[in-house]
Image (cartoon, grey):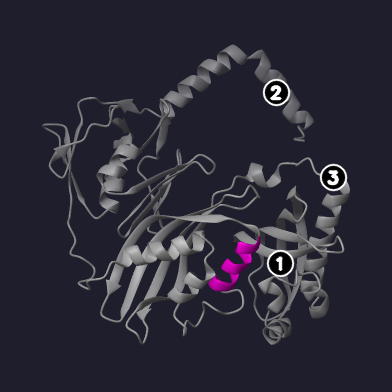
Amino acid sequence: MIKISRRERGIVLRLKKRKPMLCAMLAGMLLAAWTAHADSEIKVIIDGQEVRFGKSPVVDQGAVLVPFRVLFQKLGLFVDWNPETKSISGYGGDVSIKLYPDRNTAVINGRTVELAAPPRIMDGSAYVPLRLVGEATGRTVNWDGATRTITIDVVRKAPASAVEFDFEAFYRSFLTAGNAEDSDALLDAIHIESPTYFGIGGSWVRLLDSFMIYDIVTELVAFEVVEADETHALLRTVEKRTNTNGLFYPDNRVERLVSLVKDRQEQWQVYDLEILDLEYLVSDEALTAEADIDEAAKQAVLDAVAANLEATYGEDFEAMLDTYDPMSSAARVDKDSLKSGYLLYDLDFELEYSNVIEVTDSVASVYVVQTLRRVDGFEYGDNRSKWVHAMRKQADGSWKLYMSHLLSVEPLNE
């Protein structure tokens, strides 16, 4: 519940008395702050062809805005509009663009840039700055005032590799094996000397964990061969992952660098997967909505989460292991490494918020917000983190942690 002070209540009463006058004033202020207007005379030419957007370009604060979908597609970008996060995304080649309506910054290839004019939602369509998007794709953008024409010249790049191999087909088959949960096919595609893929908590182990409770489908959104020679290749991919079996799962979009090497039989194999960017496609409402769950079951799940946190940050290693499902890869954590962490840091945790999203006969999903602060030991960045924990019900009716998804981490500046 939002509380309003006595002073604020007085302001509200005065506002009610002046409502007609204020409405007119606010309307004038809004018009003064945003003076975007359609300009049907502006023409846009990309690669020698005039582009028809279906709706006229809009001029806002001296910048030309156009409907994003047509522009992105004409520039060869994969297009995505996420209604949950209200983000406009374009991916393709070595380009990644993310914009948000009414926000004066954009993220271009992982770097935040300032905008002369923010994207807008008008007449049910999202408009984006034309010059920003054109230049972000490595093209030149020119304005001819006499003819009111914007020309975007496409710069064609040489192939990243002269190696005659269909890397995209290979990687698509790798994803297909994962979608089919074909662990044998996946294992055949992974190099036996991969240094990080097989470790505790590595990609392979976490993938096998997910097979136990989810039916995840991975869609290849964008693909690029960054470089390749006769024995090594580096790929950049953008993938969208969604669960299809009805259980709650934080669907996500991930950008990766994929390293490939040839084995002794001269066959290409996956050597490493590096995450460049990970965006969870789940709204705050989905995480915090109060579900219709039996109170006793809900409390049992919350108690299990609290027990895991207390044992972990209470440095009680055996008690911590007892809070994990025996089938989880987390239960096979490197004991010596964790104990070394206990020697380096003395941390205090606070469970700020927890919500049971759903409970089935065998699986529960819990949203948790927690803070970590350094008490003693080596320097540590105090932070607030948000998680979704997947819990599994045991034969004795208790709940134990199976796998976790780290949604975000933000530093605590005090």
What number is the disc on residue 372? 1
Residue 340, picture quadrant: bottom right
What number is the disc on residue 12? 2
The residue that disc 3 covers is 294
User: Which residues are the magenta region?
Assistant: 203-212
Task: Name the residue nearer the viewer: 381 or 173.
Answer: 173
Q: Is residue 228 left or right of residue 192?
A: left
Label 2 crowd (10 A; few <14 / some 14-19 / many >=20): few
Q: Is residue 206 magenta?
A: yes
Residue 215, picture quadrant: bottom right
Task: Name the residue nearer the viewer: 36 or 176.
Answer: 176
Secondary element type, mark 2:
helix
Q: Which amino acid does label 3 sit on?
A: Asp
How far is disc 3 from disc 1 in space, using C-alphas?
31 Å
From the top left corner, tell me how far across and down residue 275 is, in percent.
Answer: 47, 66
Residues under numbered marks 2 and 1 in contact, where contact means CB atoms less than 8 Å apart: no
Label 1 crowd (10 A; few <14 / some 14-19 / many >=20): some
- The answer to whether residue 240 is seen in the rendering is yes
Secondary element type, mark 3:
loop
Task: Name the residue nearer the viewer: 151 or 257.
Answer: 257
Q: Is residue 21 left or right of residue 80?
A: right
Q: Which of marks 3 and 1 is in front?
A: 3
Secondary element type, mark 1:
strand
From the top left corner, tell me how far across and down residue 127 is, in percent.
Answer: 36, 35
Q: Which of marks 3 and 2 is in front?
A: 3
Residues under numbered marks 3 and 1 in contact, where contact means CB atoms less than 8 Å apart: no
Q: Which amino acid does label 2 sit on?
A: Val
- The answer to whether residue 411 is seen in the rendering is no
Q: What residue type is labelled 1?
A: Leu
Q: Is residue 28 left or right of residue 335?
A: left
Q: Residue at x 52, y 66 (%)?
A: 182
In the displayed structure, 224 sits above or below 81; it is below
